Amino acid sequence: MLLEIQRSIRREFVKTVKEVFGLETTDPPLAFPPSLDLGELSIAACFELAKALRRPPRKIAEELAARFRLPAGIERVSVAAGGYLNFHLDRPALAEGLFIERSGGLAAHAGLPNAPGGPSADGQVETALHGKVLVEHTSINPNKAAHIGHLRNAVLGDTFARLLAARGAEVEIQNYIDNTGVQVADVIVGFERLEKKTADDVRKLIADESVRFDYYCWDLYARVFQWYEAEPSALEYRAETLHAIEEGRGETAAMAELVSTAIVRLHLETMRRVSVEYDLLAQESEILRLDFWAAAFALMKAKRAIRLDERGKNRGCWVMDSGDGAAESAEGEDAKVIVRSNGTVTYVGKDIAYHLWKFGLLGKDFGYRRFYHYPSGRTLWRTAVSGEPGAPKFGGVRTAYAVIDTRQSYVQGVVAAAFRALGYEEQAANLHHFAYEVVGLTPACAEELGVALAAVDRGRPYIEVSGRKGLGVKADDLIDRLIEKALEEVRARQLTEDPAAQAEGARRIAVGALRYFLLKFSRRVIIAFDFKEALAFEGETGPYLQYTVVRARNIFRKYQETHPGFEPQKMAAEISNELLSEFLSDEPGKDFWEIVILAAQVEVIADQAIASEEPGVVAKYAFRLAQAFNNFYHHHHILSEADPSRQAFLLYLVYLVVIPAKAGIQHLISSAQMGQSHPAQRITSAASGRLPRRCG
RNA sequence: GGGGGUGUAGCUCAGGUGGAUAGAGCAUCGGAUUUCUAAUCCGAGGGUCGCAGGUUCGAGUCCUGCCACCCCUACCA
């Protein structure tokens, strides 16, 4: 609704400028005026035009205002201050249109307004929503338990994917599994050398229900590093083990397969607890076994994207001259090694191959096998050397997002540079490194976990987590703790006696709190994790949002007790245009209107979040909306309202707010699977140690 | 050395491709309430937007130079 209005204002502005001044302009940015007295949407572009036209901006704005043909939904245009062009919406019309959209659809709007690539999506967002979109996230090394850093990755990626889906994109979610890397090798070294275990021993350990296998590996991994430090010669085992795994030979490789698969299963369970699911596990083992690299290598040699370095420190290596403007590779200093002098591929090389496959540029495909069935009905597939029938078509997308921590920006840049060197400019532009910062621990938190800190460390803003030292907060421990605390709160409130219902409520609240906590920060800032903050249920938190919706629903529920058959979504018929203008008009209706206009912004905000790759934008919005509602809730007691038409209007208003609030919550926080939700709950008006992978 | 990030209230953070009076949560203090269960609401105090220049009608936002902290810059992933 609001998207269409914005679009028509932009279009009309460009047209009017051309008519009045004979000047070609681009679409002007639209902003929200500081106060609703000034209107709902504003354009500041007249200040800019003043230069070209050599006239005062205010005069320009006035002339444009006089000639502006008002698009549908706009009541009037005004000029303010030095030259702002402000647009005042037709309030009853907007409320009505919004209600119709939100209340489910109406054939009249069938699929039109915000369909992907349709007229309303913003230019840059349009590309993202067009065709199938691949989101790669989580990608944890399968060698030990997941920690909070991994949760941040998964929650960011999952929320972003939900937002894309809500705006109409077809989304494919992949989790890259580096099951043949050094991280796995290190744990295998631990099993084989430190614990003298056979593959069969490990198999028994995995089956032993009294042992948390991922926690076991967490400790073992730390022990292996202690050993490496005490005895550097032990590093030879690491190289040896890695080679055996890469080549898939012997009991070592079998054990690695056993361990990584077991850990992957545990990671899936952990992520399922916070409502994160995947479509495909893309494994490095298949990238190796199916010679994806060979295909990529041939391509790169043919297009001369890669060269054999014959001198300097990289002698004998195939390298790429890195960076964007790298003309000045003095003695190969700026070159990135892709193939080592011993002929093996580096991690970047494998990643280039994987990404080429993502865009369907490799000319090869994986085999696929079913791996896991989610209770939600989704099937998770896993790559395999030889597949089984029935697999959907994976990869071959036009746009791909890879959620990988920011420390790997350089490496990801190399992948994009490879694309460009191969002539895939468009794909390089649609290959998004969704970079986010890591999660550290506050010094206090680290000490709480039993780490002895030096005085310098105590003064730091955060302490880096380290898988090698076994320092970090395990995801499941945190979730357990949150659930425990939520359960106390649920019991204290005595909403229900049923223990099962209490447990379910506590679980939902815990997940909501955790997901919101991880989303409320911009992805660019380091989160210094602290139990007190993460366990908070008040203020800007997930439970605050959840409770807001509960309140709204309770109003309807109670009202239904005295008015059987009442259905909020059918109120449109009862609320006349006159009533709407009466309650939304300037003076008395300002507070109401403020909420309506805020509630109308969901799609605009969602598109903004997609364009900026910041799910946090939606989190902030959902919070503002909840705040506005809670304020309203306290000032207007609806059920005891004596005036029936006023009461009807208030109920109508609650409905307008609760729909986008619910949609916001579902996308950010909740466990509900969006695909199957009621159309009105979607964010579309009518269409219905080191971190992940490459780190541990 | 090179590349990137961060620096905004006591603390943790928001601040559309420059715009109209710099915001929120927490914490502190003061109010509201036996409810459409308050996981709430209202109010108060609290700011040299790291520093210095520049660009222009207008800068927290853009440019330049500094300062501080962090990350990357492996034939590791």
Image (tube, helix red, strand yellow):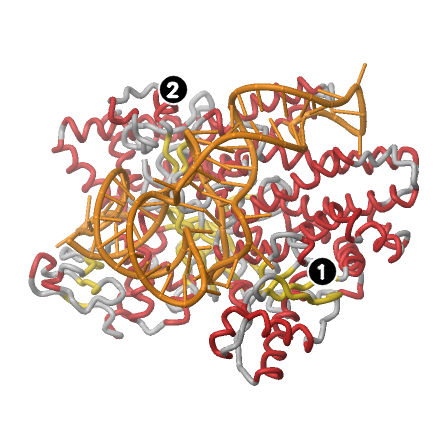
Residue B63, quarter of picture: bottom left
Protein chain holding label 2: A
Inter-mark Cα distance, 1 to 2:
50 Å
In the picture shown, does residue A88 fall above or below A454?
A: below
Q: Quadrant of residue A304?
A: bottom left
Q: Position of residue A72 (x, y in %)?
A: 75, 69
Q: Could you say whether the residue bearing mark 2 is in a helix, strand or loop?
A: helix
Q: Residue sitting at 49 percent across and 30 percent down?
A: A534
Q: Disc 1 marks which residue?
A: A686
Res. A569 visible in picture: yes
Compare marks 1 and 2 and give the one earlier in the sequence: 2
Badge 1 sits on which subunit? A
Q: Is residue A199 visible?
A: no
Badge 2 is on which residue?
A448
Q: Judge left or right: residue A361 versus residue A155.
A: left
Q: x, y (%) of residue A34? A: 61, 53
Are there few (<14), some (14-19), or many (20+) residues within 10 Å of tag 2? Answer: few
Q: Are marks 1 and 2 in contact (CB under 8 Å)?
A: no
Location of the N terminus of chain A (image quadrant): bottom right
The image shows residue A28, relative to residue A578, as above or below, that is below
Residue A123's disc is: none
Query: Can you give x and y, in whole percent of width and height, for residue A21 in the image?
Result: 57, 83
Q: Nearer the viewer, residue A342 or A65?
A: A65
Left or right for A323, reference A674: left
Query: What residue lies at 20% left-to-right and 59% top-to-bottom?
Result: A336
Amino acid type indicated by mark 1: Ala
Q: Is residue A441 left or right of residue A280?
A: left
Measured from the top left, where is residue A13 in percent x and y? 61, 74
Q: Are marks 1 and 2 on the same chain?
A: yes
As rendered, which of A560 and A209 lies closer to the eye?
A560
Name the foreground residue: A570 vs A177.
Answer: A570
